[in-house]
């Protein structure tokens, strides 16, 4: 297994964890998975900082086991540089589709992979692939 394959796999696993309602509802888990320099541009167009996301993630959509959940597909990833992975994929959530892009960063060999940046772009219903 190559370093790139391992790095991409670790980033995808982290991404999937962040979509898990049990993880989304836990501030402690968010702190473990988000880089302290994290920023996001959500599908709403709103920009989030690390502090805002840690505080608000439990209340964001997808944080309840009895509500809608994210349905991801089409993950692709590439190791851009040592310690930096770029992921792209799509999600369905509550009848809406979005294209997503994330950067995952690992500061050194002893640290975990953490999401550094995330962007979601809504896909209108009449747009194909």
Image (spheres, rainbow, N blue to C red):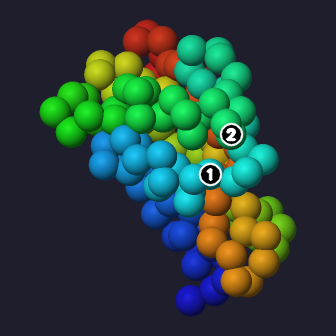
The quadrant of the picture occupied by the N terminus is bottom right
As measured in the structure, the alpha-carbon distance from the residue carrying label 1 to the one carrying label 2 is 7 Å
43, above or below 62, in the image: above
Residue 76 visible somewhere in the drawing: no
Categorize mark 1 by other alpha carbons within 10 Å: few (<14), some (14-19), many (20+).
many
The x and y percentages for residue 78 are 68, 62
Categorize mark 2 by other alpha carbons within 10 Å: few (<14), some (14-19), many (20+).
some
Please report contact status of discs 1 and 2: CB closer than 8 Å, yes or no: yes
In the rendered structure, the answer to whether residue 70 lies left or right of residue 42 reads: left
Residue 50 is labelled as 2
Mark positioned earlier in the residue sequence (1 or 2): 1
92, above or below 14, in the image: above
The x and y percentages for residue 6 are 58, 78
The x and y percentages for residue 70 are 34, 37
In the rendered structure, the answer to whether residue 66 lies left or right of residue 31 reads: left
92, above or below 31, in the image: above
Q: Quadrant of residue 54?
A: top right
Residue at screen point 78% across, 78% down: 108
Give the residue pinned by disc 1: 34
Residue at screen point 52% across, 49% down: 30
The x and y percentages for residue 86 are 69, 54
Nearest the eye: 27 or 83: 27
Q: Quadrant of residue 96?
A: top left
Residue at screen point 67% across, 36% down: 51
| Outermost bottom residue | 1
Under circle 1, the secondary element is strand
| Outermost right residue | 81
The number of discs equals 2
Under circle 2, the secondary element is helix
Residue 12 visible somewhere in the drawing: yes
In the rendered structure, the answer to whether residue 22 lies left or right of residue 38 reads: left
């Amino acid at each position: 297994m190559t370093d790139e394959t391992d790095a991409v796999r670790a980033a995808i696993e982290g991404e999937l964890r962040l979509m898990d309602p049990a993880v989304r509802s836990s501030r402690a888990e968010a702190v473990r998975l988000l880089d302290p320099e994290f920023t996001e541009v959500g599908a709403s167009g709103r920009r989030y900082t690390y502090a805002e996301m840690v505080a608000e993630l439990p209340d964001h959509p997808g944080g309840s086991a009895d509500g809608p959940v994210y349905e991801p597909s089409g993950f692709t990833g590439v190791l851009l540089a040592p310690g930096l992975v770029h992921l792209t994929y799509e999600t369905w959530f509550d009848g809406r589709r979005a294209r997503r892009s994330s950067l995952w960063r690992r500061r050194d060999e002893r640290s975990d992979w953490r999401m550094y940046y995330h962007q979601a772009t809504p896909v209108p219903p009449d747009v194909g692939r």
